[in-house]
Amino acid sequence: MSRLQISALFCGAGLLLAFALAPIVFPGPFFRVAMGDLVPLLVIAAAFIVSARNAFDSRGHTRLFWGLMTAGMAMWLFNQGCWTWFEVVLRKPLPEPSPGAMAMVLFLHIVAIIAAVAIRPHQADEREGLLPSTLNVLILLVWWIVVYAFFVFPEKYIVADAAAYSLHRGLLYRVDEVILIAVSASAFFSSSGSWRKLYRNIFFATVLYTFSGEALNAAVVRGVYKTGGIYDVPFLAAVLGFLWVAVAGRQCLRDTQMMPSISRPSFPVAPRLAKLALLSLPLMGYWAFFLSHDQPYLRQVRFTVAMAGVGVLAFVVFLKQHLMDQRLLQLLKHSRRSFDNLQRLQGRVIQQAKLASLGELVALAAGELEFPLLAILSSSERMAASSNLSREQLSNAQKIGQQARRTRELVSDLLSFAQQTPGEKGPLELKPLLQRAVQMEGFKLQSKSISLTVESNDPLPRVLGNPNQLLQAFLQIIENAVDALQEIGGGRLQVSLWREADEVVVQFADSGPGLRDPERVFDPFYTTKPVGKGTGLGLSATYGVVQDHKGQITCYNRPEGGAAFEIRLPALKANFPLAEAARA
């Protein structure tokens, strides 16, 4: 228990003692009445302020909990303010029976606290949002209003039966309190930590409030009740109990145990109460119309109230279902995006694992093949230079040398692929680098039917990269696109640059035949070129270069025809220091 709580506990005990002894010290009737009204009013106002502060400082279901507690305290404050206005300001006794608005507000302030406890924020999943809990609370509030209008209003405004009105009002109020006691007790046994203490405080405050109300009503019936008298002491103690709930809630908000934790299996209370509320109204209407012995007009009024409540609750349930369906669609879309991202991430991880393991294997195999190939190549060259061989033997020697040289080139490519190492990186602009790559490839073109262009309208930020590695990666993609265009006799390769969020995007879009299998393009040794023209390692090496630059590379077939490769590299911030970039 914190010092603030200890101080509040002693202040509350001192206030309660002073309240009990004040009529003895100052026996004047007006002082007693003023004290009996103003002190509870100030305590309830303090509970309202602290609860509102708790709601402001919390979030999610906890904010909804304290918001409902604040609403309950506000309605209680209104009722107590009406008592104070009549007895202190106007110096008149409160009309009996009390005005309908006061009775209704006093009844609903307990309903708001019931709804707060019923949502059980310690068990709520914040990822589901506040929508289900808010609509369940709305159903409970509407149901209680309908029940009050069903049992209490007719005797107040239809038949003007004061005895029946007071009886039904008092009975519903007692049912209100008993339900709050039961709900808070259930929440206490299903929670732990700070929430358990909070529900315990609500339980004891409600029990004290119920018994003080019974004692006060019994004193009124006997004609011995006086405002500010001994019967108001338990009532003030109950009010202080709810103030203690709000004060202890401040510590509860700061406690790490406010995180959702369930110590015992339990079931959600608010949705079940909402279902019972919806099912009970048709039964109430049936009882009013067919089983009640009241006057026909009164029966019709109660039946109308019940059916109106059914209509309102049906609309709320329909609204809840509609909003939940929308929420479900959003979750499904989010799940789909998450699944697609997971698949892409899994593909990247698998690709990197392939490249890493293949690099080790290739380096070992290429090193072992280098010396035997040199021996075969030198022997075949000596045989081809010998004049003692027949024509067939000379042809075979030349073929052996040709295949040995081709195998040696393949081994060289394998070693180049396996020995990729991160180069030194610095800030650079991509557009000049791409223009250089396009020019280098353009000089090799013999056909004038292939056009290579670079387009970039917006000023682009620089990226952190190695110019040689990125140039080789760009050349590899451009060469593959040119080979694809040559197969169909020509076409266009357009290289585009733009900025998207914090990335620089480079797109290579051609008008060629497209990709046969886009998902396998970056796999090692995958190639669609004729035998002897490609090893299938160029795009795998390009993939490794882009990954080393913290970027992403993807490929796909364009709807209008042709293939597209996209490279996304993180852009440097405008104020990124050059020295820091070099170190990075």
Image: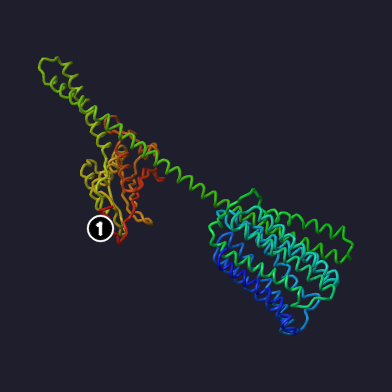
Q: Is residue 526 toward the left or the right of residue 7 in the image?
A: left
Q: Position of residue 524 (x, y in %)?
A: 33, 35
Which residue is depicted at the point 77% across and 60% down? 307
Amino acid type shown at disc 1: Leu
Q: Is residue 62 above or below residue 98?
A: above
> Relative to residue 497, is residue 262 drawn left or right?
right
Q: Which residue is mark 1?
A: 578
Q: Residues within 10 Å of mark 1 (few under 14, many from 20)?
A: few
Nearer to me, 43 or 408: 43
- Position of 254 relative to 229 (above/below): above
> Closer to the camera, 35 or 121?
35
Q: Nearer the viewer, residue 436 or 142?
A: 142
**Where residue 177 sits in the image (x, y, percent)?**
74, 63
Q: How is the image coloured?
A: rainbow
Residue 358: x %, y % from top left: 32, 34
In the orientation shown, which residue stands out farthest toward the left? Answer: 387
Residue 128: quadrant of the picture: bottom right
Residue 474 appears in the rendering? yes
* Residue name at image x 33 percent, y 45 percent: 547
Q: Secondary structure at mark 1?
A: helix
- Quarter of the image holding residue 132? bottom right
